[in-house]
């Protein structure tokens, strides 16, 4: 990921876009934060936020024309938040600490401001605080300009005077009763370094500057420069009486201040000036499910909200934010931030040279399921970002081996002689179809694989149906190993060619995804589509029961498969109660992306969340989803359980096999099929495989949790007994031996018995120690 | 006989293990750790709590370094 890609990804996440109220506000008051403070009762904090961008808070909080209100999302439910009234409440009830007397910066430059209205005062305020010398020329006998035309009940004279006092405190020179015309302007332009014309909407003087067809002084819309260099114009004079807006006048004064400062500093006046005035927010906020809360009425409208009223009104603020993906994804929630921050962390993680890579676990915990991209208004796919990050980590030789090692070894097993098998139907040299059941259905329900293969051969009796056993390679892809992944894909390509390019029938949707995306030349059909179009293989008895469907995340955009499953269930007599998240919004069971390996605690939360989403029994069509749910006590059938076994209770509650049994089941399936269908025998078993173990249930559970397989233990014992390299515990008489077959060192505490060994304990580590017989 | 060095003996050499500095390594980093070791053949003893505690911690640190 380079900086350009990072920037593009950051832009795609809109969570940090200003909410509509702030975007519409010409001076961008952080209304959301202000209201959050008010809701907590902290009016001083609210005032601090307001005053940060509003130079005359007492005045503006009484007369602001609040363009924010028109875009307030609460307004789509009922009345918008009374934002100006809450700003006034902050002014009334909050207190600002005495501003510390800081030495004023000194910038050289004399600036003339023509007109003492709120726009001219804003320029004077902003630039005096930067250290410029300011002179205001006001035609009237007091500063304030158009403010004096406001309703006095609303804006009393003392409020104007008190707020404007700061101008005198900042040392601004004020010339009252001084009318400036175009002759004076030339003189001023010569005497001062810059001039701001803010004479308000009533003035008739045009200063002989270039004007538009309506007679209004022409200014650059971004910088407010007029046709005369160093002379700027803004505020009411640009808008006329009808359109007059005090907050717009302040905003333009502020923007002129920026222009004049840059003009005098001799830097670009135009560079990176985006969204300075009002603009349309890019923030998305889902307001469905927000309950109505009526506008809080004021006890005393002349005073405004009492503090307790203000708190209640501020609590009506929705606190607009996006967070759509975070709300939907347990993984994105787990790490406490949101994609804009996450992509920056990933970028840092990948570009760091020395130091801790804090995002390793984050990157490896993603299920790569694509739900975030589906939900995101901008379709930002964190799965794609994480997969690329994993590939980079592997390429940099920075991928922690613990993250995916176990899964990759499981894949390796499946693609070893133990399970890998490619056969045309007996007595044939080519196939029209080939069943590819994948590794996990074969591990979880080997009996179903035999059944399906036999039925397919019957259903397609006039055609040749072959069989391929193995792993599609998905774990290599998830682990960020394109080299390994490609070598597996290439093997499948070769096998399929040798079989005469048959159409591949796929029960597993992860395999389907791999074939579809990475073997585009191979013709594929989901087994469920096949059953939907060719009919069910078994006799149908109407179940008349209601179930919920968990669509595997790899079918997210395969609506034809999802439809096929629903048709099959209908034919079997099941009513369907859809889960709140299904089809393209389905969630991962935690197996995807090897989340369960990289972050078991998170995986547990993910499964728990999913199984609590529906009260009825689940049906799914992925063996891993089924085993993950049923293993946690959620009654879940694989669709094959319903097709072949009418959905027995035993099958709904059956815990899936443990990791060792998964290997055994695959190996046994191959052996059985070879013997029964092709009349072949398997040979070449390793010496350790015949070692018989006696493992109590509690030890078994411990091994499962520690990802230690029976074959790992057999290897340690075979090595220890052959080499006599073992320790003896003189208290218990138990042996303890260690051995490192590949990357992990396994320790086994055991005792020989007549026909094998009792296993008391086993544990492992990755650090290398001497004497581990590493091979 | 409850101290670990009195409990464990090397089965092959038939002698008690003794504390010694042993080099352990991970991801290209090696450092000495005091472990029980057979003074004759060098077979070492890593107790369960060390393997599942401190060792995992250090492995994680080195993986993220």
Image: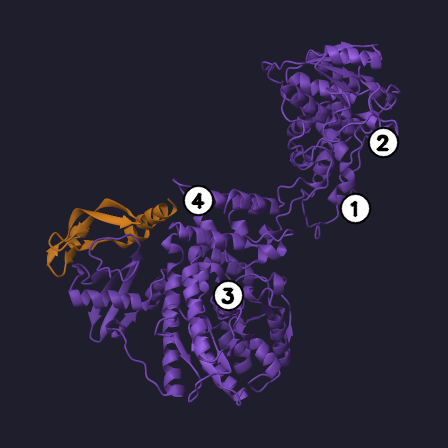
Callout 1 secondary element: loop
Q: Quick check: can you spot residue A240?
A: yes
Please state the chain letter of the residue tagged with numbered disc 3 in the rendered image: A
A111 left or right of A336? right
Residue A243 tag number: 2
**In terms of sequence position, does the residue under pointer 1 or pointer 2 come before the other?**
1
Q: Residues within 10 Å of mark 3 (few under 14, many from 20)?
A: few
**In terms of sequence position, does the residue under pointer 1 or pointer 4 come before the other?**
1
Residue A518 tag number: 3
Q: Quick check: can you spot residue A646?
A: no
Are the two marked residues, 2 and 4, in contact with CB atoms closer than 8 angstroms? no
Q: Residues within 10 Å of mark 2 (few under 14, many from 20)?
A: few
**In terms of sequence position, does the residue under pointer 3 or pointer 4 come before the other?**
4
Residue A358 tag number: 4
Q: Closer to the observer: label 1 or label 4? A: 4
The hue in which chain B appears in the rendered picture of the protein: orange
The hue in which chain A appears in the rendered picture of the protein: purple
Q: CA distance from mark 1 to mark 4?
A: 45 Å
Please state the chain letter of the residue tagged with numbered disc 4 in the rendered image: A
């Amino acid at each position: 990921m380079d900086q350009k890609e990072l920037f593009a990804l950051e832009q795609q996440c809109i969570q940090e876009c200003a909410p509509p109220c702030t975007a519409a506000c010409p001076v961008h008051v952080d209304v959301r934060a202000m209201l959050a403070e008010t809701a907590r009762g902290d009016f001083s904090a609210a005032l601090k936020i307001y005053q940060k961008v509003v130079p005359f808070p007492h005045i503006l909080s009484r007369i602001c024309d609040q363009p924010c209100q028109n875009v307030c999302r609460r307004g789509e439910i009922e009345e918008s938040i009374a934002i100006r009234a809450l700003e006034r409440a902050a002014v009334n009830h909050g207190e600002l600490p005495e501003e510390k007397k800081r030495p004023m910066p000194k910038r050289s430059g004399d600036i003339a401001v023509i007109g003492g209205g709120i726009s001219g005062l804003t320029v004077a305020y902003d630039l005096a605080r930067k250290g410029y010398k300011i002179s205001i020329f006001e035609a009237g006998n007091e500063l304030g300009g158009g403010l004096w035309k406001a309703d006095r009940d609303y804006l009393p004279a003392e409020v104007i005077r008190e707020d404007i006092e700061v101008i005198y405190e900042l040392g601004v020179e004020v010339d009252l009763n001084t009318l400036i015309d175009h002759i004076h302007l030339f003189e001023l332009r010569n005497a001062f370094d810059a001039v701001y014309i803010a004479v308000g909407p009533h003035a008739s003087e045009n200063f002989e500057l270039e004007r538009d067809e309506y007679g209004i002084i022409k200014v650059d819309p971004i910088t407010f420069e007029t046709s005369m260099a160093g002379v700027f114009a803004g505020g009411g004079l640009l808008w006329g009486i009808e359109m007059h807006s005090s907050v717009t006048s302040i905003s333009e004064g502020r923007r002129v201040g920026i222009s004049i400062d840059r003009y005098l500093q001799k830097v670009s006046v135009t560079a990176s000036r985006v969204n300075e005035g009002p603009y349309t927010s890019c923030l998305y906020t889902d307001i469905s499910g927000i309950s109505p809360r009526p506008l809080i009425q004021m006890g005393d409208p002349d005073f405004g909200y009492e503090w307790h009223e203000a708190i209640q009104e501020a609590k009506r603020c929705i606190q607009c934010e996006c967070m759509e993906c975070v709300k939907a994804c347990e993984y994105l929630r787990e790490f406490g931030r949101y994609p804009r921050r996450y992509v920056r962390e990933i970028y840092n993680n990948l570009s760091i040279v020395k130091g801790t890579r804090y995002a390793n676990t984050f990157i490896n915990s993603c299920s790569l399921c694509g739900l975030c991209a589906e939900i995101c208004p901008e379709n930002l796919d964190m799965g794609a970002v994480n997969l690329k990050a994993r590939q980079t980590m592997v390429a940099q030789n920075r991928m922690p081996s613990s993250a995916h090692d176990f899964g990759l070894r499981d894949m390796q097993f499946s693609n070893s002689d133990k399970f890998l098998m490619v056969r045309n139907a007996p007595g044939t040299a080519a196939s029209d179809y080939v069943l590819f059941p994948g590794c996990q259905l074969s591990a979880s329900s080997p009996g179903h694989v035999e059944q399906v293969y036999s039925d397919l051969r019957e259903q397609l009796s006039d055609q040749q149906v072959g069989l391929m056993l193995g792993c599609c390679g998905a774990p290599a892809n998830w682990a960020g190993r394109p080299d390994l992944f490609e070598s597996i894909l290439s093997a499948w390509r070769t096998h399929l060619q040798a079989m005469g390019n048959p159409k591949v029938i796929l029960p597993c949707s992860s395999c389907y995804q791999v074939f579809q995306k990475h073997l585009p030349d191979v013709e594929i059909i989901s087994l469920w589509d096949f059953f939907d179009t060719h009919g069910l293989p078994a006799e149908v008895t109407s179940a008349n029961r209601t179930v919920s469907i968990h669509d595997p995340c790899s079918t997210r955009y395969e609506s034809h498969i999802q439809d096929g499953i629903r048709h099959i269930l209908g034919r079997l007599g099941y009513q369907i109660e859809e889960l709140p998240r299904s089809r393209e919004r389905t969630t991962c069971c935690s197996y995807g992306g090897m989340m369960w390996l990289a972050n078991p605690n998170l995986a547990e939360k993910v499964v728990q969340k999913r199984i609590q989403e529906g009260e009825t029994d689940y049906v799914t069509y992925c063996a891993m989803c089924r085993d993950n749910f049923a293993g946690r006590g959620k009654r879940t059938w694989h669709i094959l359980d319903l097709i072949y076994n009418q959905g027995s209770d035993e099958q709904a509650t059956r815990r899936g096999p443990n990791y060792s049994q998964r290997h055994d089941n695959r190996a046994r399936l191959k052996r059985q099929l070879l013997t029964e269908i092709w009349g072949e025998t398997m040979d070449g078993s390793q010496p350790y495989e015949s070692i018989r173990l006696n493992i109590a249930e509690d030890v078994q559970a411990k091994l499962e949790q520690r990802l230690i397989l029976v074959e790992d233990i057999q290897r340690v014992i075979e090595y220890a007994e052959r080499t006599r390299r073992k320790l003896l515990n003189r208290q218990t008489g138990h042996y303890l031996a260690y051995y490192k077959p590949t990357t992990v060192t396994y320790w086994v505490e055991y005792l020989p018995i007549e026909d094998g060994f009792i296993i008391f304990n086993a544990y492992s580590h990755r650090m290398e120690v001497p004497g581990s017989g590493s091979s | 006989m409850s101290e670990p060095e009195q409990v464990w003996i090397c089965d092959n050499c038939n002698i008690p293990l003794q504390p010694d500095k042993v080099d352990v390594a991970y991801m290209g980093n090696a450092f000495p750790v005091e472990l029980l070791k057979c003074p004759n053949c060098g077979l070492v003893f890593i107790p369960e709590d060390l393997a599942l505690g401190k060792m995992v911690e250090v492995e994680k640190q080195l993986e993220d370094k």
